[in-house]
């Protein structure tokens, strides 16, 4: 199946290379990240058993085509196995050949000004304050249909997003599991230098409660019963706020995100607050960022939340510090530090350092 996916993906990529594309405006995209990852779980001294060093690569390679003014399509393959929240490939197994997977495959149709219909395996359409991964891991590419609306006036940009995503296709009369999601928000310009973005969302999962976890038989921190079945439904309300601006010529951002699962009785709240300074978007640009996060065991759906913080999933709390330096338009460096604890009854300490080199075009 994997070989088939890879062959189809590569075929389409070749078919859309600029030389053969005729009138269509095709843009290739690619990035490769090389990462050193050091994880320490539990109260052990560094260097002792319990610290795991590893190096990992991530490749993403694709193309997008503007077919008409109102229609575009995009395809991307990535390294890794089929993990929904990671495309990393650990360097291991005697230089064995590594697999490619289908990461994005969708089209974007804009029949009316301000409206957009996105269909397929697509980028996450929801606004996330400060790139927060509390509810949605940054690698997640959901599958289904999204309708987007946006309207720009002099100082305010309104946006509304509605999605119907297929979480699990089941058969033999078993109900399929969906994620039905809606988000509304606005970005407001305040004076010359400030932008305030506020959002509110409702994320309703169907047909999860009383069933097995949907990926890898792992609830990723969510509560399961003695038989391994999910105890709760997930009906999330989510609020986000971000203030971007400039102070003493330095770009900064303040951000916060709160989510609550209305269907759970315990561990139902998650929140995050943080700040960043700098802008890594240009050559010689840099950014330093800090956030504190607390995620109740059933506050969000664990399978789709951050795969790195606290070892991944829910039932975590702690600090996240990261810095990025962009040397030139193709090369940047990052350092990320996780200082967290896991709500596993023992309050296990989880620390992690990631050192990244990223090359992209
Ligand atoms: Ca991830
Ligand atoms: Ca079905
Ligand atoms: Ca529900």
Image (cartoon, grey):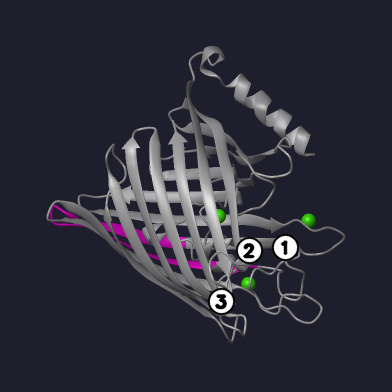
The stretch in magenta equals 183-205
Tell which circle, 2 or 1, labels the residue nearer the N-terminal end.
Answer: 1
**Within the displayed image, which quadrant is ligand 2 positioned in?**
bottom right
Q: Nearer the viewer, residue 338 or 170?
A: 338
Gap in angstroms between the C-alphas marked 1 and 3: 32 Å
For ligand 1, tell me if the residue under mark 2 lies within 8 Å: no
Q: Is residue 71 left or right of residue 186?
A: right
Q: Nearer the viewer, residue 234 or 85?
A: 85
Tell which circle, 1 or 3, labels the residue nearer the N-terminal end.
Answer: 3
Q: Is residue 29 magenta?
A: no
Q: If the image is split into quadrants, where does the N terminus sit? A: top right
Q: Is residue 74 visible?
A: no
Residue behind mark 1 = 214
Q: Position of residue 15 (x, y in %)?
A: 62, 20
Tell which circle, 3 or 2, labels the residue nearer the N-terminal end.
Answer: 3
Residue behind mark 3 = 43
């Amino acid at each position: 199946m994997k070989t088939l996916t890879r062959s189809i993906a590569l075929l389409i990529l070749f078919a859309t290379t600029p030389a053969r594309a005729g009138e269509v405006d095709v843009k290739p995209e690619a990035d490769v990240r090389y990462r050193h990852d050091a994880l320490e779980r539990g109260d052990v001294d560094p260097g002792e058993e319990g610290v795991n060093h590893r190096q990992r690569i991530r490749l993403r390679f694709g193309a997008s085509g503007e077919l008409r003014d109102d229609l575009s399509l995009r395809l991307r393959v990535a390294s890794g196995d089929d993990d929904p929240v990671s495309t990393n490939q650990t360097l291991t197994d005697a230089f064995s050949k590594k697999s490619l997977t289908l990461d994005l495959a969708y089209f974007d149709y804009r029949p009316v000004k301000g409206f957009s219909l996105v269909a397929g395996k697509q980028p996450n359409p929801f606004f996330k304050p400060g790139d927060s991964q509390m509810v949605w891991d940054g690698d997640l590419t959901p599958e289904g249909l999204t309708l987007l609306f946006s309207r720009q006036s002099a100082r305010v940009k309104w946006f509304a997003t509605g999605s119907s995503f297929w979480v699990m296709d089941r058969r033999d009369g078993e109900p399929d599991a969906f994620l039905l999601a809606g988000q509304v928000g606005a970005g407001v310009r305040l004076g010359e230098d400030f932008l305030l973005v506020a959002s509110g969302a409702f994320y309703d999962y169907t047909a999860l409660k009383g069933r097995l976890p949907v990926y890898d038989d792992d609830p990723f921190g969510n509560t399961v019963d003695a038989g391994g079945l999910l105890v709760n439904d997930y009906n999330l309300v989510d609020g986000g706020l971000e203030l971007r601006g400039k102070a003493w010529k330095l770009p900064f951002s303040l951000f916060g995100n709160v989510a609550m699962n209305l269907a759970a009785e315990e561990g139902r709240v998650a929140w995050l607050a943080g700040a960043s300074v700098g802008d890594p978007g240009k050559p010689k640009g840099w950014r330093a960022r800090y956030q504190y996060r607390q995620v109740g065991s059933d506050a969000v759906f664990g399978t789709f939340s951050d795969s790195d913080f606290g070892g991944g999933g829910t039932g975590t709390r702690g600090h996240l510090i990261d810095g990025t330096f962009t040397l030139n338009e193709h090369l940047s460096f990052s350092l990320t530090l996780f200082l967290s604890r896991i709500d596993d009854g023992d309050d296990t300490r989880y620390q992690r350092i990631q050192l990244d080199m990223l090359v992209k075009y």
